[in-house]
Amino acid sequence: MGSELAPNARRLGLRVITKRRWRELRDEYKANIKACQSRVDDQLRRSAKPITFTEGTIVRYHGVDPACTKTDLAALFGAFGDVQYVDHSHGRLAGYVRYAQPNDAARCVAYFAQHPRMVHTARLAGDLVPEGEAHGPVNGQPAQTTEVPPEESVEAGRAFIRTKVLQGKEEINYWHGVRQFWQNQARQTGGTSDGVGSQQGEPEADLQPSGPTATAAVNRQHTRFEEPED
């Protein structure tokens, strides 16, 4: 049967091999893929570096208008200092904002500690509205934390804005989560991200993955070799 098909296969530009040879090539292919993935994992582990960051720059907020955008929040929290990045998902009440300096984060938290009845509405271009009157930020003594209320802590259908500077283990865990996210992205794309985070769009590289450029073949879609029927 095989000898009868060989001339037709050659005429069509196809290669005819024995089943034994096909199995050898299949096993070799699978072994190469496994070795490539193993090398990338080893490179990531060997190249992992301690996370370095400026302490006291991450503020967790709660109580913003769910309809607001990252641009709205960048403008809102930018009144207190230089906003480097807004970590927010549309439709949520809570998120994180990263400032350039700890003093900026402290100023933000101090303001909301001194004005505990602030509400936020996206309909007013991201304005703060206390008792129907808009106010800008004020200078105050740095307040490290204000309690973040539970999701159901609302009045008249709105939550008051609460803020908190991440510290200690909570801050370290946040940065570990960021790095892990970008390492996973690097594994999926076969390389490392080298962009710069933007406060008005999706993050490109809020924290650089620590591993070297991964082999492009990793995690691409591969042909699946199934055992042929005899």
Image (spheres, rainbow, N blue to C red):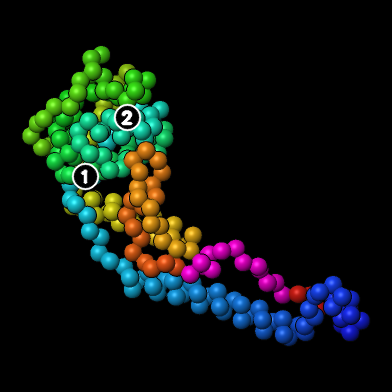
For residue 37, which numbered disc appears in the image?
none
- Residue at the spot 72% in from the left edge and 85% down from the top edge: 21
Which secondary structure, mark 2? loop
Quadrant including the N terminus: bottom right
Q: Given the image, on which type of amino acid does mark 2 rest?
A: Val
Name the residue beneath numbered marker 1. Answer: 100
Tag 2 or tag 1, which sits nearer the N-term? Answer: 2
Local crowd size for mark 2, using a 10 Å CA cut-off: few (<14), some (14–19), many (≥20): many
Residue 33 seen in the current view: yes
Residue 93 seen in the current view: no
- Residue at the spot 67% in from the left edge and 84% down from the top edge: 24
Q: Given the image, on which type of amino acid does mark 1 rest?
A: Ala
Q: Which residues are magenta?
A: 215-227
- Residue at the spot 51% in from the left edge and 67% down from the top edge: 216
Q: Quadrant of residue 50?
A: bottom left
Labels 1 and 2 touching (C-beta < 8 A) = no
Q: Image height check: is 214 above or below 120?
A: below
Spatial separation of the CA atoms under disc 1 and disc 2 = 21 Å
Name the residue beneath numbered marker 2. Answer: 64
Horizontal and vertical percent position of residue 37: 49, 72
